[in-house]
Amino acid sequence: MEHAEWARELAEHFLREPLPRRWAHTQGVAARAVSLTPILGEHADLLITAAWLHDIGYAPDLVDTGFHPLDGARYLRDVQRVDDTLCGLVAYHSGAINEARERGLIDLLTAEFREGRPELAEALIYCDITTGPNGERFTVHERLAEICARYGPGDLVTRVIGINESLLLAAVASVEAALADVR
Ligand SMILES: [Fe+2]
């Protein structure tokens, strides 16, 4: 768990003080990732590392474009020299490609980062979207409703949730099926 421990410390450094709720959410997402260890096999450390780092781009010190998946992935690539696979997981996490399209940032995102293995992207969606804003466990429907309520009906994020809903539900169903298989 060497990478995961490094990632935990990095996320804590950037999030805990300025964004305590985001830090609480991140801890919950990482705990969910740990719970997926039985279905992740050799990729467990990578997924747990990505869970710690997925929202690091919200950190005030790292905001550049204001689109947190891209800002976080750029910091990891340019400053931390993190490999393509991990940067890709952060850059594209939880349907970020559709938000990038809405924000006019899709050309930048796709030019700079590659989307990784679909099963890892799905696992990260599961962890993110079944964790509430304070790190609590949520159903996917509770989480989607919470995000839409937090941002409000006219917001771009709420619109993107509508676009991403089927993708997010499919990812959660796929991970739940894999978990059921190993139980
Ligand atoms: Fe995020």
Image (spheres, grey):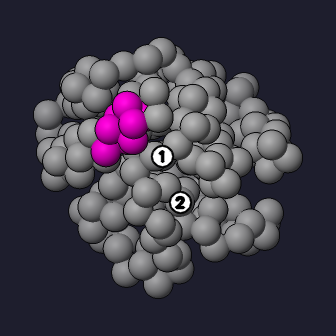
Up the image or down, 126 lies above or below 132; here it is below
Specify the quadrant of the image occupied by residue 162.
top left
Quickly name the residue at label 1: 124
CA gap, disc 2 to disc 1?
8 Å
Q: Tag 2, which secondary structure? A: helix
Q: Is residue 119 left or right of residue 172?
A: right
Badge 2 density bin: few <14, some 14–19, many ≥20, Cα 10 Å:
many
Q: Main secondary structure of the magenta part?
A: helix
Picture quarter containing residue 55?
Answer: top right
Decide which of 66, 142 is in the foreground and name it.
142
- Can you name the residue that lies furthest to the bottom here? 111
**Residue 147 screen position, x and y as percent:** 30, 30
Q: Earlier in the sequence, mark 2 or mark 1?
A: 2
Circle 2 residue = 89
Query: At 72% across and 39% down in the image, what residue appears?
Result: 11
Determine the residue positioned at 19% across, 44% down.
165
> Is disc 1 placed on a helix, strand or loop?
helix
Q: Are marks 2 and 1 in contact (CB under 8 Å)?
A: yes
* Residue located at (17% from left, 47% from top): 166
Rendering coords of residue 173 (x, y %): 27, 39
Which quarter of the figure is the C terminus placed in?
A: top left
- The percent coordinates of residue 130 (x first, y second) are 39, 28
Magenta region:
174-181
